[in-house]
Image: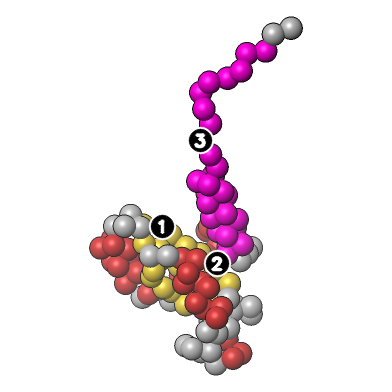
Amino acid sequence: MKSFIYIITDRNRNNLHVGLCTDLLKTLEFYSEMPTLFFDSSKHLTRLVYFEEINSEEQAMDRFKYVSTFTRAQKEKMIRSANSDWMDLTKGLKIEQEMYSRAAMRPAVTSARKSLTF
């Protein structure tokens, strides 16, 4: 089962939170619905700035434990290597999910084609 290691931050980049989940979009939705659950109102964690997709839960847990021990400078270096502008990656994930869900909803194309005669 796929797991995700992610780093989210607030709009001022004051806090960097490392997390582990199996459904990244649901987790980000949870953060947006409950902004003051873990932090006070001035520290809304709303921007996904880094994530890794890992196929094994054990490997994901090991990676999470490893990344959680990083200093702030190490986390910033890791983020900049993949997302140098610190862009919010949530929008891209939502667009990608919509594309895949639309592709799954399309009817299958039949192999029989109508021949055109002139």
Q: What element carries label 3?
A: loop
Give how far across and how far down residue 83 sits, in percent: 57, 60
Looking at the rendered structure, the secondary structure element under dot 1 is strand
Q: Are dots 2 and 3 in contact, CB under 8 Å?
A: no
Q: For the residue carrying disc 1, how many other residues have a C-alpha within 10 Å: few (<14), some (14-19), or many (20+)?
A: some
Question: Which quadrant holds residue 68?
Answer: bottom left
Residue 65: % across, % down: 32, 72
Residue 91: horizontal and vertical position, in percent?
A: 61, 62
Q: Tell us which disc is closer to us: 3 or 1.
A: 3
Please state which amino acid type lies under the numbered disc 3: Ala
Task: Identify residue type, mark 1.
Answer: Glu
Vertical arrangement, residue 20 with respect to residue 15, above or below: above
- On the image, the x and y values in percent for residue 69 come to 36, 75
Q: Name the residue under label 1.
A: 53
The type of residue carrying mark 2 is Val
Disc 3 marks which residue?
Answer: 108
**What residue do we see at 41% from left, 57% from top?**
53
Q: Give the range drawn in magenta.
A: 89-116
59 on left or right of 88:
left
